[in-house]
Amino acid sequence: MIDSEEILLGGFMFNQGLDWQSKTRPEWFSNSTGVVICETIQRLHSENKTVDLSSVVFQSGLNAVTVSEIYNKYSGQELSYHWAIVRQEWTRRHGEKVLQELSYKIQTSDPFEILKELQGQIDLLQLTESGQGISLGNLLTERAANLATRKNNQLKTVGLPSGYARLDKFIGGFVPGELIVLAGRPGMGKTALAFCLAIQHCRYGGRVMFFSIEMNKEQLGDRGLALIGQIDNLRIRAAEVSDEEIERINRNIYSYNLPFEIETSATITIDQIRARVKCMNPRPTLVVIDYMQLIHGQGKKSREQEVSYISRQCKLIAKDCKCTVLALSQLNRETEDGNTEPKLKNLRESGAIEQDADTVMFPYRPAYYGNKEEIPEIEEDPKIIIAKCRNGMLGNVPVSFRSKTVEYFW
């Protein structure tokens, strides 16, 4: 047993570091003696019994001399330091064991199955850093301090601002750990709204990772040029622009040097997206996925099962990576006539999307369903329907839509 293991267990028998004790797992210790002592201490605490040298010796059945030697290793050391070493050494030992086992398997097994198993083991190792419980009292103290800080700094949102105050009043901004689903029929401007929200979010201190499965980087780039130059998107694509407009674009580009990264692989899987986000340093505060039904899952038996898996993984990305995930989704055809506003039941292919999402928003443009020749350049009647908001308000957020630059604005 390494010194840090003995010091940690000795401290626990002195009733020190109760927070660290609750976060410790018996299997972290390198021999059976440490495992038994840790299990005994945690059992005594759970039964609300006294934890000291004699109780541990009696309850564990271990040799009294052996337990006394460990007990005497503690002499007031800072347990957080030794807890970190014990956790790190277990992670190293377990990682070496996993890699050794997989190195044998990969010679005879499906390499893609081995990669999935490896990802599962990585997730297991990361549980040593997350998923620990917190007492209600500590949680309330933490949130009260956060509330006071936001009040003193006049921050009206729980999360980072989306960049649009009207929307933030409903959803509380982009909150880490939350999944926001932005759903609509084709032509409603889902990508346009997500793109505008992402840019504004960056301008308010956020970092964005934008996965575009539907559009390639050239299409997104041209939309960006239309936006910053306030030029008709169709003229951008046809290169029918004046010298003055090109000059305006070049003049404004510097203001779009934002922490905004785009990936446009058409074959990316949800597991690859999760791994990509986890590897980013620093981590993004907003992950946009455009859109869910185009992502490859795990080849489930049915499309509904596959979309359910993708939806669940989107939520896990938000929780594990402490970011907001904005996932775009299609609606079924029931709202195609334009006379019926979209509802949660119209989410396409899986009820799991509604279940997993913290917030569901529908961009809705009534003018789109009218006479196409009479649609104004700037539509004043679109709205964002907040159909579900677990931690906010339901309602309609009025917006405007500029068709030439494919842009939502408030």
Image: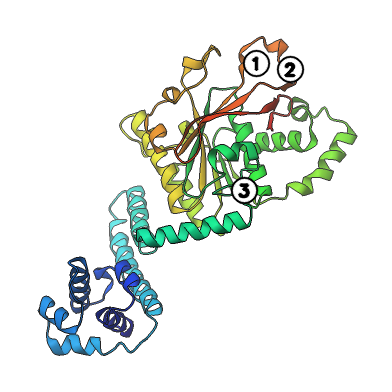
Question: Which residue lies under the disc numbered 2?
Answer: 376
Tell me if mark 2 has few (under 14), some (14-19) or many (20+) residues whose alpha carbon lies within 10 angstroms of its own. some
Does dot 3 land on a helix, a strand or a loop? strand
Placement of the N terminus among the 4 image quadrants: bottom left
Residue 310 is situated, as x and y percent measured from the top left of the image, at 41, 38
Answer above or below: position of 71 versus 332.
Answer: below
What residue sits right under mark 3 in the picture? Answer: 261
Q: Name the residue carrying label 1.
A: 367
When asked about the image quadrant of residue 15, the answer is bottom left
Which amino acid, mark 2? Pro
Is mark 3 in CB contact (under 8 Å) with mark 2?
no
Give the side of residue 322 with respect to residue 122, left or right.
Answer: right
Which sits earlier in the primary sequence, circle 1 or circle 2?
Answer: 1
| Left or right of 287 on screen, residue 105 | left
Residue 357: % across, % down: 44, 37
Q: Are marks 1 and 2 in contact (CB under 8 Å)?
A: yes
